[in-house]
């Protein structure tokens, strides 16, 4: 009854966008407070350090997996019609696109969701990178890069349905999916205690994971309640939504509102509120052209790679993984491998080079540590 009342009051279109906005605000707030970032987690793992960044990511990942699977087992959620499972998928796109995205997030010093969060607190490097990311994603979707994306995606495909469902392929079922999520949540709890992860570190990370599961649940509930619109069952992702938001801004008024178009501005608002409350708003820009080229190249790789893979670090690495999509897990593995290799080839080698004499006009950003966003 509450859903019908809400739909009557807001209208179906605005209700769907409002759902995206509310979840986006909470995601942005929790992501900013927890410093949730796949790039930081990968680098910490690859370098063998123990600073809690990997643990923060595990809190989000395990919470999203566990809660989504519990919703499914309880009969509250059905993801069989979701694009990540029902449609034909591309294994070549997942592998190549995931590798491109992983390399890109090292060069841009943040994945797509992290760039949006940082831009909201005044990071102009992240703002420019986010714009390049959105343009690249749109070009890969329907623009000049679309033929290349379709060619690469067509090299190795897999049927939709059970062929893309890891739980069906392995025979583990949803009970196995719940056990896997619970195992990693227990690991995150143990490591979080040992590493003394802060309250906002673990609480915010859990909040991000909850938003992923609630997005699945909310879109499924609305898909069954609306009559005049088709609402896809989906969760959080930032490749397609970034491209959609860009086109909304560039297109004439009157575009149909949807979940994605509420999500992106919602995340920005949530991150801005968090930065404002904790007095972390600060304008930051580039200090040299060479660093700018690095950020732009990374953003381009993420935009094209994310569209080719069918998801970003959140869309494939958490949302898609939470429903055990084969292509999403392949994308996540490719991201980790490529990001680790890129960090070793670009940043770690650079850090081992003896410091050169200071030269007037040199770019200090080239020696930035991985800890800086």
Image (cartoon, rainbow, N blue to C red):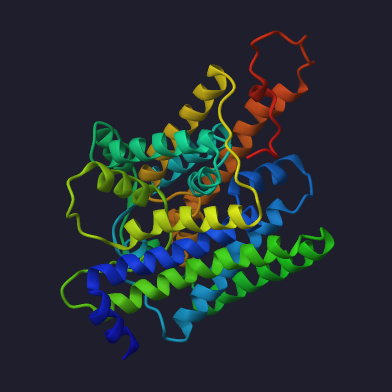
Q: Write the residue at 44% across / 55% down.
A: 315
Q: Nearer the viewer, residue 159 or 113?
A: 113
Q: Position of residue 126 (x, y in %)?
A: 51, 38
Across and down, in percent, residue 125 comes to 53, 33
Name the residue: 26% across, 44% down: 247
Say which quadrant the C terminus sits in.
top right
Camera-nearest residue between 239 and 279: 279
Image quarter for residue 290? Answer: top right
Task: Report the quarter where the N terminus lies.
Answer: bottom left
Q: Is residue 331 above or below residue 323?
A: above
Q: Is residue 79 visible?
A: no
The residue nearer to you, when weighing 147 against 1, is 1
* Residue visible at 45% across and 49% down in the picture: 312
Residue 179, position as x, y percentages in the image:
61, 75
Residue 103 vertical placement versus 280 (above, below): above
Q: Is residue 34 above or below residue 172?
A: above
Q: Residue at x 35, y 52 (%)?
A: 241
Tally of marks: 0
173 relative to 90 in the view: left or right: right
Q: Is residue 321 left or right of residue 264?
A: right
Residue 202 coordinates in the image, percent (x, y): 69, 64
Residue 369 visible to an observer of this rendering: yes
* For residue 33, side relative to residue 94 (left or right): right
Give the residue furthest to the right: 194
């Amino acid at each position: 009854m509450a859903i019908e009342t809400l739909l009557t009051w807001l209208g179906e279109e605005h209700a769907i966008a409002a759902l995206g906005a509310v979840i986006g605000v909470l995601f942005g707030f929790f992501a900013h407070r927890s410093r949730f970032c796949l790039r930081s987690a990968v680098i910490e793992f690859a370098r063998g350090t123990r600073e809690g960044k990997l643990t923060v990511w595990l809190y989000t990942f395990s919470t999203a997996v566990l809660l989504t699977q519990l919703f499914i087992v309880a009969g509250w959620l059905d993801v069989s019609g979701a694009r990540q499972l029902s449609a034909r998928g591309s294994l070549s796109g997942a592998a190549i696109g995931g590798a491109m995205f992983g390399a890109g997030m090292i060069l841009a010093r943040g994945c797509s969701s992290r760039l949006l969060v940082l831009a909201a607190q005044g990071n102009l490097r992240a703002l420019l990178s986010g714009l390049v990311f959105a343009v690249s994603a749109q070009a890969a979707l329907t623009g000049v890069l679309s033929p290349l994306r379709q060619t690469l995606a067509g090299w190795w495909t897999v049927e939709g349905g059970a062929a893309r469902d890891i739980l069906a392929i392995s025979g583990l079922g949803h009970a196995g999916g719940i056990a896997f999520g619970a195992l990693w949540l227990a690991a995150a709890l143990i490591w979080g205690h040992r590493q003394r992860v802060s309250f906002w570190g673990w609480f915010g990370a859990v909040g991000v994971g909850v938003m992923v599961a609630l997005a699945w649940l909310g879109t499924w509930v609305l898909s069954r309640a609306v009559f005049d619109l088709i609402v896809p069952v989906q969760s959080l992702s930032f490749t397609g939504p970034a491209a959609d938001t860009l086109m909304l801004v560039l297109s004439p008024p009157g575009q149909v509102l949807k979940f994605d178009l509420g999500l992106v501005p919602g995340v920005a608002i949530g991150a801005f509120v968090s930065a404002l409350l904790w007095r972390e708003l600060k304008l930051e820009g580039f200090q040299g052209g060479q660093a700018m080229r690095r950020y732009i190249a990374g953003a381009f790789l993420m935009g094209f790679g994310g569209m080719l893979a069918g998801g970003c670090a959140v869309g494939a690495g958490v949302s898609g993984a939470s429903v055990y999509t084969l292509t999403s897990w392949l994308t996540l593995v490719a991201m980790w491998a490529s990001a680790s290799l890129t960090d070793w080839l670009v940043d770690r080698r650079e850090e081992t080079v003896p410091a050169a004499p200071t030269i007037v006009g040199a770019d200090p950003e080239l020696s930035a540590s991985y800890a800086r966003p």
